[in-house]
Image (cartoon, rainbow, N blue to C red):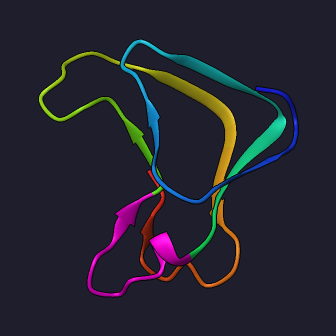
Amino acid sequence: MDAGVYVITSTLFIPVGTRLVGEAWATIAAKGEYFNDQSNPRVAVKVGEDGEVGCAEISDVVFTTIGPGMRAVLL
């Protein structure tokens, strides 16, 4: 994953078996109304689907929010 800030406005799905390596602390940043509903927390980055078994490797990647994002579950 090239260096930079990648802004997401809904859940980013990463499949089981993925190897994601950031360059110089690549950043995935959640932003927008999708992540701002206090009564309905939303996941920013989801690894695998419910019921799947396996692993994924994620390194040198920063997860954050831009703006309030008060109900974002980052990973």
Depth check, front residue: 28 or 24: 28
Q: Which quadrant of the view contains residue 59? A: top right
Q: Is residue 61 left or right of residue 72?
A: right
Q: Position of residue 17 (x, y in %)?
A: 41, 12
Q: Which of 60 and 41 is in front in this view?
A: 41
Q: Which residue is drawn at 63% across and 68% down?
A: 31
Point 39% across, 83% down: residue: 37
Q: Magenta stretch containing residue 61, yes or no?
A: no
Q: Which of 8 and 16 is in front in this view?
A: 8
Residue occupying image coordinates x 70% and y 72%: 66
- What residue is at 68 percent from the left and 39 percent from the top? 61
Q: In this view, does 33 lie above or below 74?
A: below
Using the image, determine if residue 7 lies above or below residue 65.
above
Q: Does the magenta stretch include residue 37?
A: yes
Residue 36: x percent and y percent? 47, 81
Magenta residues, start to end: 33-43
Q: Position of residue 14 (x, y in %)?
A: 46, 29
Which quarter of the figure is the N terminus placed in? Answer: top right
| Left or right of residue 16, residue 54 in this image | left
In-image side of 2 versus 66 (left or right): right
Number of numbered markers: 0
Q: Which picture quadrant has residue 71?
A: bottom left
In the rendered image, the residue lying farthest to the left is 51
